[in-house]
Image (cartoon, rainbow, N blue to C red):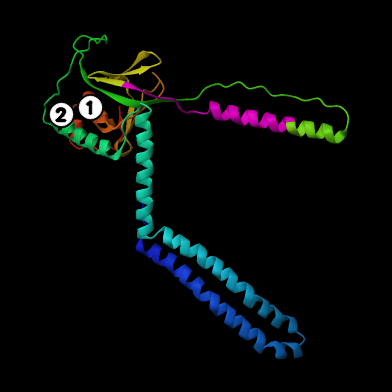
Amino acid sequence: MTRKKPQTRRVAHLKWIICLGGVPASYYALGFLGKSLDAYLATLGFGFLASLLLFLSNVVPIVFLFLFVKYAYRAWRTSGLSLERQRIAAERAHERRAGQIVVQGGPDLTKAAMLRARTTAQHLRQQLVDGNFPALHPSAYLALKPGEGILAQTRIQYSRFYGMTVNYTERSTLIFGNPLLMLGGVVGSSIGNSRARASAQAMAATQWREHQFTDLVVTDRRLLAHVGGRWLEFWFDCITAMYPYANEGVLVLDFGNDCVPLRIATPEAAALSIWITHQLKGPEALQLWNPGEVLQR
């Protein structure tokens, strides 16, 4: 959460202070002018101006009061105490959502799990930079390639990014009789068709789909995700670009024309991006590795 600059906060406080002072100032100033100039303006035939000033002496303070509440609330929202409360509330909401994901069979994205995973990722990076290749293991149920080994298996939230073709039917209504009834039928049919078209466009739009919790197996050459009762393979050498979001526990892989992008949500996202970077570009690429850096080939 970004904090506003001190100068911006001072301006925010100055606004509500001015509005607060404007409440009594406008009430007494306009009221005084209205009463003082009443007789004089009446002799000139502009007595209505005095009445207008007296009217404004009751209206303008209300406007200043409204602006005071508005700007005071904005200033409070940007204060350090309010920002801290918002941060705590956001963390609690995140922890609740993360706990619900675990209950539903998904990965553990709680703050504690993310901190542990970040420490693991840092150790893995240092290990690879030092030239110490981690131990790989065989599999009793996966048909691995000769010389291929498993580094780890983890729980992830899996999704893919693509659009699709959606068919919808436009209905036409024929009504005979009362003109108002006919007009109502045409309008109702148009509204229904418009909603169906908008719904179809929303469903067809390019977006993340196939959201599900599943197992991910990481080898020295590919990722294997158990989706729809089968193991889908994503080879490292087919990756066109990699977008790691370590703080959110998300890794997005782009495979160019080979297949649609893959999104992996797991606390091990940072470690995954480190491992893939090492396998594609070697330990030298990890010397100045940034968990938010985009890897392109």
Residue 128 has which mark?
2
Is residue 123 shown above or below 78? above
Single out the residue that lies furthest toward the right. 177
Give yes or no for residue 248 being in the magenta stretch: no
Residue for point 66% across, 84% down = 34
Residue shown at 75% from the left, 24% from the top: 172
Callout 2: SS: helix
Read off the residue under disc 1: 275
Q: Specify whether residue 152 is in view.
A: yes
Q: CA distance from mark 1 to mark 2?
A: 9 Å
Looking at the picture, does residue 59 appear above or below residue 9? below
Q: Which mark is residue 209?
A: none
Labels 1 and 2 touching (C-beta < 8 A):
yes
As drawn, 197 above or below 237: below
- Where residue 16 appears, x then y in whole percent? 47, 68
Please name the residue shown 60% across and 73% down the image. Answer: 60
Q: Say what secondary structure mark 1 lies in.
A: helix
Residue 262 visible (yes or no): no
* Amino acid type, residue under disc 1 in the picture: Trp
Give percent across and percent down for residue 207. Answer: 47, 29
Image location of residue 214, percent across then percent down: 35, 22
Counting from the top left corner in percent of width and height, residue 273 is at 26, 30
Question: Which one is in front, 154 or 159?
Answer: 154
Magenta stretch: give its range.
189-215
Quadrant assignment for the C terminus: top left
The answer to which quarter of the image holds residue 131 is: top left
The 10 Å Cα crowd at callout 1, few under 14, some 14 to 19, many 20 or more, is: many
